[in-house]
Image: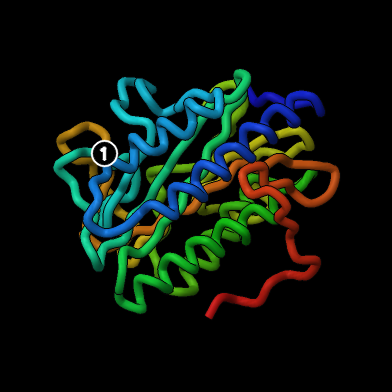
Amino acid sequence: MITIKNAHQLAKMRSAGHLLYDVLCGLREVIVPGMTTLALDAWASERIRKAGAVPSFLNYHGYPACICTSLDSQVVHGIPSDAVTLDEGSILSVDCGLILDDWQADSAFTVPLGEVPDEVLALIAVTEQCFFEGARKAVDGGRMGDIGHAVQSLAERHGYGVIRMLTGHGIGRQMHEDPSVPNFGSPGNGIRLRRGMTLAIEPMIALGDYAVRELDDGWTIVTADGSPCAHYEHTIAITQGEPEVLTLPGYAFPTTEPDAAP
């Protein structure tokens, strides 16, 4: 069932989103080659709890950490470990969620670790733009397919693979609520978007093919061809006008359609 949030509930989600933004901004600053992914998890956990919030990923369906740390060909759900060190030349996707006053926020980003190939830097940049292309279509009266089509069109224009097995999702009191938010689709198709819906839109874009597989740990998803993958996510609210990015305070969508990414 899709839940429609009122103004009071959106204010609660806005507070959670702004806190998560602060946490992830700080986390970006401490990411350096040589540290372990478990150290990142500990940093995020402490920051979230000190702010009076709860890490929403920890123990979710048995997940053993507070953040997901996915390296290179890992798409999502990489488990932080003291045995995994961040290496120069890799890329790292960090996904994090928290609960503040019973309301959820969810966000993810990908960063390069030192020098990486230009084609991988371009993948990260286009994946981020895919989010904004999709999110600007999240308007009252639109269709879910409008969001997915915008993401897919930009990614495939660059020859990238749009991960299909995994999607974004509704979000509110629960981390995963209806509806699913695919990163592919046809404009004018899918459920009708309504003011008060809150969505986590999260393009996962591979340099190669979109096929994926799960590792033996039961969590980590990797590209089947071993190609690098980037991930970018924000929690948004559909409003009377342009969407509000709850996990990116102060962001305003451009008044005109952006040019295609280089």
The image position of residue 230, as x and y in percent, is 39, 58
Residue 252 image offset from top left, x and y in percent:
75, 57
Q: Is residue 105 left or right of residue 160?
A: right
Q: For the view shown, which residue lies furthest in the right direction?
A: 240
Which of 34 and 232 lies nearest the eye of the viewer?
34
Element type where label 1 sits in the image: helix
Q: In the depicted view, which residue is nearer to us: 205 or 25?
A: 25
Q: Residue at x 15, y 36 (%)?
A: 216
Residue 127 coordinates in the image, percent (x, y): 48, 62
Q: Tell me if 173 is positioned left or right of 108 in this view.
A: right
* Residue furthest front in the image: 50
Q: Is any atom of residue 178 visible in this view?
A: no
x and y, in percent, of residue 163 in the image: 39, 52
Q: Is residue 245 left or right of residue 225?
A: right
Above or below residue 151? Residue 249 is: above
Mark 1 = which residue?
Answer: 38
Asked where in the image residue 87 lies, by quadrant, the reply is bottom left
Q: Quadrant of the N terminus?
A: top right
Residue under the image location 45 percent in, 38 percent down: 96
Three-letter code, disc 1: Leu
Is residue 120 or residue 184 the one in the foreground?
A: 120
